[in-house]
Amino acid sequence: MLIKSKRGWEIPEHLATPEGIFLSRRRLLGAGAGLIGASLLPGVAQAAETDPSASLYPAKRNERYTLDRPMTPEKDASSVNNYYEFGTNYDVGRAAAKLKVRPWTVTIDGMVEQPRQVGIDDLLKAMTLEERLYRHRCVEAWSMAVPWTGFPMKAFVDYARPLSGAKYVRMETFLDRDVAPGQSGRFYPWPYVEGLTMAEATNELAFLVTGVYGKPAQNQFGAPLRLATPWKYGFKSIKAIVKFTFTDQRPKSFWEVVQGAEYGFWANVNPQVSHPRWSQATEKDIATGERRPTLLYNGYGEFVAGLYGDPALKGEKLFM
Ligand SMILES: Nc1nc2c(c(=O)[nH]1)N[C@H]1C(S)=C(S)[C@@H](COP(=O)(O)O)O[C@H]1N2
Ligand SMILES: [Mo]
């Protein structure tokens, strides 16, 4: 994520423009990639062996969600990640591997029939896993296409049994400064928070991710539970979720607090609405470097455009 007024502990100067990001990504994908991949492999194999959910993978692919572009190779998608808890660069795999993802308790509270806590493996037993190929578009104008495994957020909302007055779901990432060095940066409002309206959370596309590439997700992808809302910019897809709070108050998301003039609550992808500091008209594939025109709602308009037709939303900044 790029923010306007650079402070000493924030992004290095060479990352301060989208081009800088791409250059540094290319460097990562070039000389560095093999090294990073190789050094991660032992940890990865170990994680897969000890992960109590490993036998649930691979899940059956849901063919309803198709790609208009090649899937991003796993080595690229897993070596270029945004996860500020573990650093402001993109090679966070090694740092994120330190996060313990078992045991992992998910809290459900706020406007629900009965607040409760559930262990991730019990939650997985209550849900049916499927695989979906989704596009993923970062607000910084890079993109990829990944095979997520998880369950529809709608199924989770049904499980959580919110009260009829709930209008939003607020999600929160873990907070542990000992494992996540980034969380010591006092400029940021940790823990990471995101939110959706109930209509968005129960839209068929909203997906809670537990795995990717046919196996439990590596930590850098947001294990053991992260969101995927492919019609929105990537910062909405919060990683390592520990809490879902149902509420009638619109949550303030992490990046909205950090830089509200540039990153809003809605964050729907739109090629015609520029970021204040760069165009969103095109995007760059992290694996191939190829540029493509950005699509309205990241190409998912048939699923989600109806969410935003309500006259009550007039005046909302739906695309930032
Ligand atoms: N907790 C948390 N979630 C997060 C982030 C983060 O820094 N912390 N980065 C966001 C951003 S800006 C993007 S683009 C995606 C990146 O997901 P990926 O690394 O799987 O590509 O995660 C999002 N979720
Ligand atoms: Mo992002």
Image (cartoon, rainbow, N blue to C red):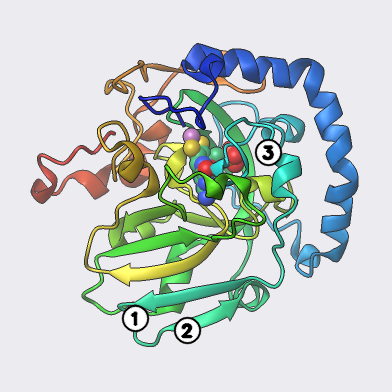
Residue at 41% across, 54% down: 193
Separation of residues labelled 2 and 1 (CA atoms): 9 Å
Q: Quadrant of residue 188?
A: top left
Image check: 238 left or right of 59? left
Residue 202, visible in the rendered structure: no
- In the picture shown, does residue 152 fall above or below 147? below
Question: Does the residue tagged 2 have its C-beta within 8 Å of any atom of ligand 1?
Answer: no
- In the picture shown, does residue 9 fall above or below 228? above
Which percent across, then down, holds residue 154?
Answer: 43, 65
Circle 3 SS class: loop
Q: Nearer the viewer, mark 1 or mark 3?
A: 3
Which is nearer the eye, 22 or 309? 22
Of label 1 and label 3, which has the lower sequence position? 3
Residue 51, visible in the rendered structure: yes
User: Does the residue at mark 2 contact the one at mark 1 (Cβ under 8 Å)?
Assistant: yes
Q: Which label number is shown at residue 116?
A: 2
Which percent across, then down, holds residue 275?
Answer: 32, 23
Q: Quadrant of the C terminus?
A: top left
Of label 3 and label 2, which has the lower sequence position? 3
In this figure, which residue is indicated by the disc labeled 1?
Answer: 112
Q: Which label number is shown at residue 92?
A: 3
User: Does the residue at mark 1 contact the one at mark 3 (Cβ under 8 Å)?
Assistant: no
Question: Does the residue tagged 3 have its C-beta within 8 Å of any atom of ligand 1?
Answer: yes
